[in-house]
């Protein structure tokens, strides 16, 4: 290392004796002197060991402050990313799953109520119990957000009322009497049966009205609750994202001040010791610089991962959920119209779904996701063809088709939406996990690098002091 | 959005971070599957489950090689699901594609023993019949792709039974003692017993499954069953040894068409889905964890899900195709009698009376397997 041979102690520029009088005021008051010159003069008034200790101690103190601030910032980042990974992101994903499940329940409900099909009833029961499980899981993930919990209570109440209406309608339709019912079922069925007319035609009408009522609950209560929980989750996501890197500026500021002090210290030492380089202090500077770079790099990688996850994953999830909502309404309208042998205008719903699929195509950013969206389009085309055929039929046969080919095409479409959701979910959750991984070692590396830097400062100052003696 | 405000700060900070630690950079993991560049793979399937080269006609595997340059090292030694259970319990599965039945596939998926499908190279994934997409254990078929599906109902020779068979109860009618065949697959035999009890095999409980098994046990003890069969129920019905049997739809179809070895065409042998319903099952392609050449495997799956190739397979194996468009293709191929055959393409009413085994815990299923096997073997 290129180091000028050390001067013997005492050969450096003479230090004023301890207790020497301060420099004349005129020199400070000239206004010409730079900050460095002022500092230099101030230092000249104290002994070499004295100012070495003072500045060295100051720098070490700066490094300790940097450690504290940096670790706090890193822990905040860790906490925020862990919250996103373990709570916010899964809750946001899961709540969209509730929507898919209710859509599937809705699609099979008509068949489950109006026919003896146990297979369709099983589809309905599976879907509604899955929705309840997903809602429960969301509940355990949303933390202490009061609006989300209130919405989830509404969601659960909506699901109970929804399934109550379906069971009541099923009881009124007088079918599937052999299927064992739960106590809840029996209560709902009993109440409904009391309300129903005794003539078959009237009972059928009451059953149809009950279905319509259930669909309305699904469309309003459930959909609104899902929207509310989603909005709450999104706000939480934004808040946590803001926390990641929230302490970076302060950390960098402290680090930068300390680094400047360290560099100035070396310049001063050079001028007073005729040494060009001070290896320990250079090492200390590099370690501090490394700590600052690692800190900002980790937090920015964490933020990048989250932003990519949100842009590539969650935005796609919400976009796909919009498709679901439109298709869900369409299926409900179709069921209403078919039950009442009415016609429906499908134009707006078709346009909305088409728009959603186009958006999903644009957002797809991997070959796997593109493949899933391609499948979604094919399944949509099939479902759309079925909807058009059922909607234009107008005969009682349309109901059979709704429960047969129509249900099949809807389930194909609905599960293909879930596949796209699944890819987005993977991307979103992977992004959240990547954000957590990026800051996993940050507190430890901050402590390690800054304390090593402080040790180097200590070593460098000690060496200079030894040389002085 | 509050998070967005950090962009400007972050951009500034990035400039600093770019000083030297760019090697630390990470990001969202790549979700695309490594497909490999090999053009061959090993597949284990049940016997007689794909159309072979036959006279001047090329089978599916030969056409695949010609059309897509994919070679399949095809092994037909999957005799029953115990083979699959043994394979997947070993450290290395020496196949890249295996075709277990649906219930075993569900267990393998639950145990994390299979790879996700490389759907990016399977555009015909869109042709999966939605019936197979709604299984709770793999919604959307992301981890398995059905090969063929079948129905376990009742096959009978009316000339011998002397009457039409319409109910599962007929299998237990003492009038047919010793002339009834019982299938050796626990979930199908017990499933039929459950349906007779008014229980639903797609939502089994330990109690209802035990009650279904009790039906079988009582019948065994009463000497009701003359044979315990797999696909050999056809030869036993053909020979008159059995009058009626729990039967697979595909093998019955082959018997009716005269496509079973050593049996003449027997269009008089009926296959019925009993009033109580029947058990539906499917065998499904799964990719064991760590399999290589996912690209070639995906190409194969895509190929067999092209209705043209699916129709060729259906015409040969006689089971229910899980591929949409197969019936239309058979009509286009001049085989409307196959396209309109309810054993190959059940209508909606029939489908609504089919139940796929829903599954219990692994321990309960193992116990049921043990108890059932003790009765039939």
Image (cartoon, rainbow, N blue to C red):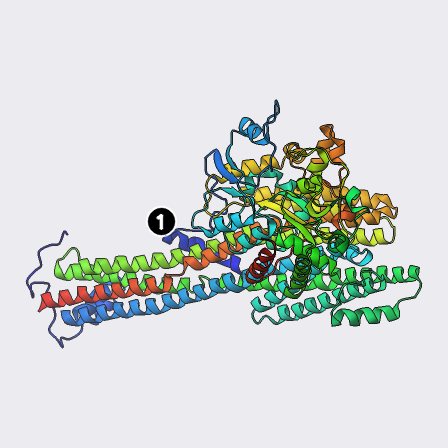
Identity of the residue drawn at 20% across and 65% down = A40
Residue farthest bottom in this picture = A19
For residue A375, side relative to residue A467 (left or right): right
Q: Position of residue A152 (x, y in %)?
A: 65, 68
A60 or B112: nearer the viewer: B112
Check disc 1 and report its element: helix, strand or loop: helix
Residue B312 at least partly seen: yes
Q: Position of residue B159 (x, y in %)?
A: 79, 42
Query: Vertical placement of A163 versus A401: above or below?
Result: below
Q: Chain of mark 1?
A: B
For residue A170, side relative to residue A258 (left or right): right
Q: Which of the 4 image quarters holds residue A119?
A: bottom right
Q: Position of residue A314 (x, y in %)?
A: 57, 54
Q: State the residue position of label 1.
A: B23
A57 or A363: nearer the viewer: A363
Query: Vertical placement of A309 versus A50: above or below?
Result: above
């Amino acid at each position: 290392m290129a180091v000028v041979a050390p001067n013997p102690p005492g050969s450096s520029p003479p230090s004023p004796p301890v207790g020497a009088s301060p420099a004349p005021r005129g020199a400070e008051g000239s206004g010409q002197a730079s900050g460095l010159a002022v500092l230099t003069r101030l230092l000249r008034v104290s002994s070499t060991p004295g100012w070495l200790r003072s500045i060295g101690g100051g720098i070490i103190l700066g490094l300790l402050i940097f450690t504290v601030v940096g670790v706090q910032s890193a822990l905040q980042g860790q906490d925020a990313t862990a919250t996103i990974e373990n709570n916010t992101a899964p809750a946001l994903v899961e709540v969209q799953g509730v929507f898919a499940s209710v859509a599937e329940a809705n699609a099979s409900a008509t068949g489950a109520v109006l026919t003896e099909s146990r297979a369709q009833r099983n589809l309905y029961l599976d879907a509604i119990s899955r929705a309840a499980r997903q809602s429960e899981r969301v509940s355990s993930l949303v933390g202490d957000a009061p609006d989300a919990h209130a919405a989830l209570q509404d969601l659960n109440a909506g699901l109970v009322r929804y399934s109550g209406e379906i069971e009541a309608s099923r009881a009124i339709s007088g079918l599937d009497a052999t299927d064992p019912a739960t106590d809840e079922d029996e209560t709902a069925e009993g109440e409904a049966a009391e309300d129903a007319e005794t003539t078959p035609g009237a009972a059928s009408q009451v059953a149809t009205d009950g279905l319509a009522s259930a669909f309305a609950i699904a469309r309003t209560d459930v959909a609104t609750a899902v929207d509310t929980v989603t909005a709450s989750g999104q706000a939480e996501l934004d808040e946590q994202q803001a926390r990641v890197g929230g302490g970076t500026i302060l950390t960098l500021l402290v680090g930068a001040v300390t680094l400047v002090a360290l560099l100035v210290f070396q310049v001063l030492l050079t001028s007073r010791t005729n040494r060009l380089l001070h290896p320990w202090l250079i090492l200390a500077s590099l370690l501090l610089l490394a700590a600052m770079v690692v800190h900002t790099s980790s937090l920015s990688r964490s933020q990048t991962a989250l932003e990519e996850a949100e842009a590539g994953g969650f935005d796609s999830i919400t976009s796909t959920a919009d498709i679901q909502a439109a298709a869900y309404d369409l299926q409900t309208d179709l069921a209403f119209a078919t039950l009442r042998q009415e016609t429906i205008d499908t134009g707006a719903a078709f346009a909305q779904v088409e728009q959603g699929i186009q958006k999903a195509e644009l957002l797809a950013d991997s070959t796997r996701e593109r493949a899933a969206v391609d499948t979604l389009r094919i399944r949509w085309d099939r479902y759309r063809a079925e909807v058009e055929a059922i909607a234009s039929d107008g005969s009682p046969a349309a109901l059979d088709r709704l429960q047969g080919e129509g249900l099949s095409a809807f389930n194909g479409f609905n599960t293909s939406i879930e596949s796209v959701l699944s890819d987005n979910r993977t991307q979103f959750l992977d992004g959240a996990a990547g954000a957590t991984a990026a800051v996993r070692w940050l507190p430890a590396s901050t402590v390690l690098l800054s304390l090593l830097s402080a040790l180097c400062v200590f070593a460098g100052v000690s060496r200079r002091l030894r040389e002085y003696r | 959005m509050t998070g967005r405000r950090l962009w400007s700060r972050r951009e500034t900070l990035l400039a600093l971070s770019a000083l030297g630690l760019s090697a630390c950079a990470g990001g969202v993991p790549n979700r695309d599957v490594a497909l490999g560049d090999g053009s061959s793979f090993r597949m284990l399937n049940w016997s007689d489950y794909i159309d072979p080269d036959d006279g001047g006609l090329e089978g599916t595997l030969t056409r695949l090689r010609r059309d897509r340059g994919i070679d399949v090292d095809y092994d037909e030694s999957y005799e029953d699901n115990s083979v699959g259970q043994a394979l997947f319990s070993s450290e290395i599965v020496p196949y890249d594609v295996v075709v277990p039945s649906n219930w075993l596939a569900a267990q393998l998926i639950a145990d994390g023993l299979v790879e996700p499908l490389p759907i990016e190279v399977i555009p015909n994934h869109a042709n999966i019949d939605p019936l197979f997409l709604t299984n709770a254990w793999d919604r959307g078929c992301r981890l398995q792709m059905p090969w063929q599906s079948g129905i376990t109902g009742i096959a009978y020779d009316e000339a011998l039974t002397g009457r039409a068979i319409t109910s599962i109860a007929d299998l237990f009618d003492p009038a047919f003692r010793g002339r009834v065949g019982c299938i050796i697959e626990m979930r199908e035999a017990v499933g039929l017993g459950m349906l007779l009890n008014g229980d639903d095999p797609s939502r089994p409980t330990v109690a209802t499954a035990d009650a279904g098994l009790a039906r079988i046990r009582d019948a065994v003890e009463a000497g009701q069953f003359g044979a315990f069969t797999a696909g050999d129920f056809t030869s036993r019905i053909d020979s008159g040894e059995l009058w009626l049997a729990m039967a697979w739809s595909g093998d019955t179809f082959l018997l009716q068409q005269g496509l079973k070895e050593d049996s003449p065409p027997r269009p008089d042998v009926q296959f019925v889905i009993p009033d109580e319903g029947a058990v539906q099952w499917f065998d499904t392609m799964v990719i064991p964890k760590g399999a290589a050449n996912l690209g070639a495997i995906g190409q194969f799956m895509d190929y067999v899900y092209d209705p043209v190739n699916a129709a060729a397979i259906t015409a040969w194996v006689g089971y229910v195709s899980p591929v949409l468009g197969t019936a239309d293709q058979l009509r286009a191929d001049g085989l409307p009698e196959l396209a309109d055959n309810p054993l190959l393409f059940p209508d909606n009413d029939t489908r609504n009376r089919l139940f796929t085994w829903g599954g219990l815990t692994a321990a309960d299923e193992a116990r049921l397997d043990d108890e059932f096997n003790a009765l039939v073997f």
